[in-house]
């Protein structure tokens, strides 16, 4: 049987409202249950972009991975563009500008995993 300490740091992760894009939709941050003495090396957020809108152009110190859950859109990063659909995964190095415009009729839903590189 697992210890009570393990039980407090395992299981479903709750999300809380974090902020909203200027036109796209809400962003929620995961509340990871690990103790501050041994935190996870990453953070997690989930977000949506309404049809016909885009998330805010983003650039930051952290590396980031997007996991596309639903919908489709045109991703712009640095000076490149590509179409993303549900099931796609994309990675961004720190300080690379990135944004997605929802080109479809349905909400675009994604999960972000982000962390600071060791040399940040």
Image (spheres, helix red, strand yellow):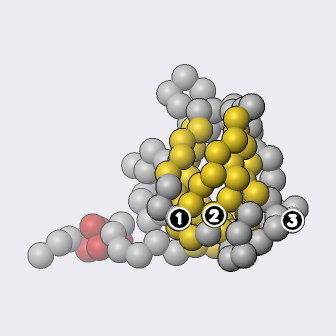
First in sequence: mark 3 vs mark 1: 3
Q: What secondary structure is marked by label 1?
A: loop
Q: Are marks 3 and 2 in contact (CB under 8 Å)?
A: no
Q: Mark 3 to mark 1: distance in Å? A: 21 Å
79 over 98 or under it: above or below: above
Vertical order, 18 against 80 (above or below): below
Task: Tell me the SS state at disc 2.
Answer: strand
Q: Position of residue 18 (x, y in %)?
A: 71, 65
Asked if residue 75 is positioned above or below residue 24 in the image, the reply reads above
Query: Quick one: which residue is furthest to the left in this view?
Result: 1
Q: Does residue 118 appear to the left or right of 11 in the view shown?
A: right
- Quarter of the image with the C terminus is top right
Question: Where, by quadrant of the figure, is residue 3 drawn?
Answer: bottom left
Q: Crowding at label 3, few (<14), some or many (≥20) Cα neighbours within 10 Å? A: few
Q: Earlier in the sequence, mark 1 or mark 2?
A: 2
Residue 71, can we see it?
A: yes
Residue drawn at 54 percent across, 46 percent down: 90
Mark 3 or 1, closer to the camera: 1
Element type at marker 3?
loop
Residue at image point 29% right, 68% down: 5
Q: Residues within 10 Å of mark 1 (few under 14, many from 20)?
A: some
Examine the rendered structure and indicate whether residue 105 appears above or below residue 38: below
How far, Cα to Cα, is label 3 from label 2?
17 Å
Looking at the image, which is closer to me, 69 or 8? 69
Real-space Cα separation, disc 1 to disc 2, in angstroms:
7 Å
Which residue is under mark 3? Answer: 23
The nearer-to-camera label among 3 and 2 is: 2
Which mark is on residue 72? 2
In primary-sequence order, the first of circles 3 and 2 is 3
Mark 1 lies on residue: 86
| 117, 111: nearer the viewer | 111
């Amino acid at each position: 049987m697992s210890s009570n300490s393990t039980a407090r740091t395992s299981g479903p992760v709750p999300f809380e409202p974090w902020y909203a894009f200027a036109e796209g939709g809400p962003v929620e941050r995961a509340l990871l249950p690990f103790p501050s003495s041994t935190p996870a090396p990453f953070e997690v957020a989930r977000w949506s972009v309404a049809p016909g809108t885009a998330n805010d152009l983003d650039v930051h110190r952290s590396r980031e991975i997007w996991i596309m859950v639903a919908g489709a859109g045109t991703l712009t990063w640095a000076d490149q563009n590509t179409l993303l659909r549900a099931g796609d995964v994309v990675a961004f190095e720190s300080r690379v500008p990135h944004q997605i415009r929802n080109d479809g009729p349905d909400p675009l839903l994604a999960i972000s995993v982000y962390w600071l590189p060791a040399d940040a």
